[in-house]
Amino acid sequence: MADLKIALICCWWVTEIKYISFRALVAMTKLIVGVCAMDIKARSKPMRHILDKLLSYGEFEVILFGDHVILEESVDHWPLCDILLAFFSRGFPLEKAVEYWRLRRPFCVNDLLLQYVLLDRRLVGQLLDASDVPTPNRLVVNRDGGPTLPSELVELISRDFNIDLSSSALFPQHNVRMLDADTLQVGRRILRKPFVEKPVDAEDHNIYIYYPRSMGGGCRKLFRKVANKSSEFCPDVVDIRMDGSYVYEGFMPAENAEDVKVYTVGLHYAHAETRKNAEGKEIRTVAEMTCEEQEIARRVCMSFGQTICGFDIVRSGGRSLVVDVNGWSFVKGNENYVEKCAAILRDTFLCASVSKRHSLGWKYEPFPSATEGQWRLKCFVSIFRHGDRTPKQKIKMTVRHAAFFELLPADYGGEDVIIREKALLVKAFNISDRVLKETSREEEDYVRLQQLVEVLGKKMRVLGTKLQLRKIRTNDPQPSMLLIIKWGGDFTHAGRHHSKDLGENMRKDLTILNRALLDDVRIFCSAERRVMATAEVFAKAFLSTAEVAPSYVTVLKEALDDSFVSKDDIEAVKKRIGQRLLDDSKKDISDDPTVHLGRLKECLQMHRTIMKRKLETADLENIRWCCSDSLTLFRERWEKHFGDVLDSSAEWFDPSKISDLYDSLKFDALHHRDVLEMLFTDDDPISVTALHDLYLMAHKLFDFVAPREYGSSAEERLRIGRQISGLILHRVHSDISAAILSATPSTRLYFTKESHMTALLNILRSCGLALHPTESLELDYLSHICFEFYERDRGGTPRYSLRIGLSQGAHSTRLLDLQVDARHALSVSSRAWLTDYLEGREALEVIWGTVEGSEEDYRDMRGVRKSSEPMI
């Protein structure tokens, strides 16, 4: 705890002697802040915000140790640092971190030895008692003989808290029994329900709350949040668990059904938030702390030696009781906290440095290079799916009115005519509007003409809207023409928001890992509008600039746009999937896709009936439409989905209809939730359940269809994957190979569409790289696959390492349960690692064995020509 005491004294010194210039006292070299934590924590969004703010002061250099170093390197090869931010999470080798601290003696922000205490709820309770911190009444059931702790920690606890952790009497194994259904006896002590049963392992979050018969009995099981679910009530569970060691606490009913999460930064600052679950969403509100709670925060921070520390309080019966101490925790999404936390840490770091430099017999010798001989990120390559878009739609109709033939060119020879120009689309709108006014409501074409006018009126000035015309050759004396209007696939405001957020966060991440990565950036995208728009918004945020120079973003059609070389293979695969969806030989299996399709049809039939009735009776005048949508377009979209699924052939089902349906459901759940609920549900609760079941079944069927659309066997997935995305992986290999030969780090970013992402992932899973086994994952908007290539030069012999990660993008499995703000934008999920750190050159050889050949060979295979041009 010595480092914490130094920090506290220094913070007081800062307050009292503000006029002293730290920059005059601190050597001109920057202080090195080492972050020794698992990547999933060290590179999390809250951590990035704090580190980015610290870097902005210009007084520190940040080094992330990284999983590779922490797990595989001996501590004498870990980076040198002045300040150490080290904290435990699952998989973290705490013993090695303590060994490193003993070897190098950096200033430690959170005491490492005392983090062993945080891993055992029994020890946490004992330290809270010794520090006079109020806690609920509790009993402890020991079945493991007590924890095994470092002798140095045992001595520290004995000296500072007068607790003898080496004594077996501290962890007695009493007789445990239930005196009756509501009363637990441990030794001679009893505890009556309701009580909370917690495993002594603080990393085990399977916590049970048992209720007495007077409250209806049963048990609520708490667990780590899955989607939006973090608990389950089990009415028949009444007996306690008998398979391990547990802490039992009296259940304290929280005021307003809210618990309080407290975040300390040193002894004199604590931020508190109340947490309450409402309609499937956790609502957090900044809370004012009482004087008693502020004193509790000070004692927790001091006793556990954790400058940055989170703990939970329950306010009950006029008292505030601590029910859990979590250790290292940051507040999410609160800029005031970020500013305050970074400022306190800055003062603490500078003070600690000054204190050590002026202590007797201590001489500061700056490190020759913070990264010398250490792993550094040499090349970062990422492939992204575009951001949120509107559903793609089309209307097909036959027209006979002579006015429509005015749209054909004078030299028309029977071929299809495509109209994209705004002036011609406006002309088509005027013609359609005139014809509609001349058409009786009773005529067969009236509804279709009305839809055509509505679509053109809304979409004629939107890039990407197109009209396709073809004269029909018949024996009918009255000429007719096939008219198809296509629209949708437009980049939305939600797409702009989460593309910008992702660009900013990725910039912060790479700035911390290796700032030089931002000095050589190239961005490539396909020629599709939504992809180009995503790349542009992302690039502005990533490069922190108002305008992006054309040289930064290049359209790369041959690699990132569609080719039709795999069309026949994909059609054959879809045919097999469609037949499988109608194969009811396994209908007795609850998770079989035919069962899901049956339930999906039941839900759609119900919603079709309700929507038809609501369109005639509901007040639809004041609906606020998003993304240039309208009631007519909404109705057209959903009537098509109803027809595609409910009126489909009994011999074959087109699996692409599942993707279209799921796409629309996600879009309306985000952008038109109120309309979806208004038109699809009524007063019958069954209709509400059916809407949620519709989403669930569509999601399950999409998860069945999407991974299989590009091959059902490993060989087929690899073949189709190479046809679609082989050139992308070829460029990844070239980018990394070029980085090996270059003296400077580089960043290469590619933006494309879902099919290319799925195909690329299929190649990686089939090419022989050692990927972690994972289930098929939905690649949602802004999903991305990252290749991180590291280099270490120790003694003139460079070594390389490659790690591949995947983010599912802006994704949620329960959109209908989420409450979204006016941005309608989901946050992009963190990356999960598909591989461990692979030996770099060996991994490149495996990739080359999959994509061997020149880029010209791949362009020939895909039937495309070289076409790279700056994005305008």
Image: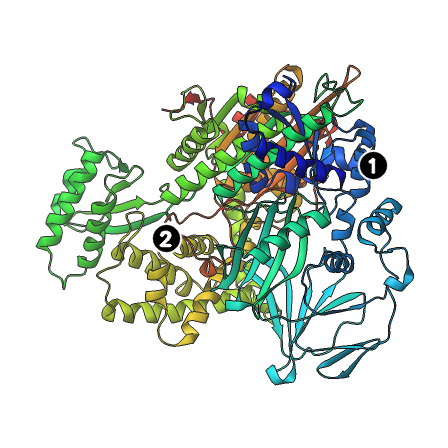
Query: Is residue 475 left or right of 24 when viewed as pictured?
Result: left
Q: Residue at the location (67% across, 52% down)? A: 299
Tag 2: residue type? His
Give neighbour class at mark 2: few <14, some 14-19, many 20+ (Cα, 10 Å): many
Where is residue 705 drawn, in percent x and y? 54, 53
Question: 835 or 244, which lies in front?
Answer: 244
| Residue 450 quadrant | bottom left
Label 1: few (<14), some or many (≥20) within 10 Å? Answer: some
**Residue 464 falls in which quadrant of the image?**
top left
- Camera-side residue of 655 and 226: 226
Q: Label for residue 870?
A: none
Q: Quadrant of the N terminus?
A: top right
| Residue with the mark numbered 2 | 671
Find the residue positioned furthest to the left. Answer: 438
Name the quadrant containing residue 541: top left
Residue 609 visible in the current orientation: yes
Q: Which mark is residue 99?
A: 1
Residue 698 drawn at (x, y percent): 48, 60
Q: Could you tell me if residue 726 is visible in this image?
A: no
Local SS, label 1? helix
Q: Residue 485's x, y, as percent?
A: 27, 45
- The x and y percentages for residue 294 are 59, 53
Which residue is drawn at the image coordinates 26% and 67% (left, top)?
615
- Residue 825 higher or lower than 188, as above or below: above
Q: Is residue 813 left or right of residue 246?
A: left
Question: In the rendered structure, which disc, 1 or 2, sits on the residue that comes first in sequence?
Answer: 1
Nearest the camera: 191 or 295?
Answer: 295
Residue 731 versus residue 354: which sits nearer the camera? Answer: 354
Say if mark 1 contacts mark 2, CB within 8 Å.
no
Residue at x-position 51% and y-position 30%: 750
What amino acid is labelled 1 in the image?
Glu
Report the Cα–Cα distance between label 1 and label 2.
53 Å
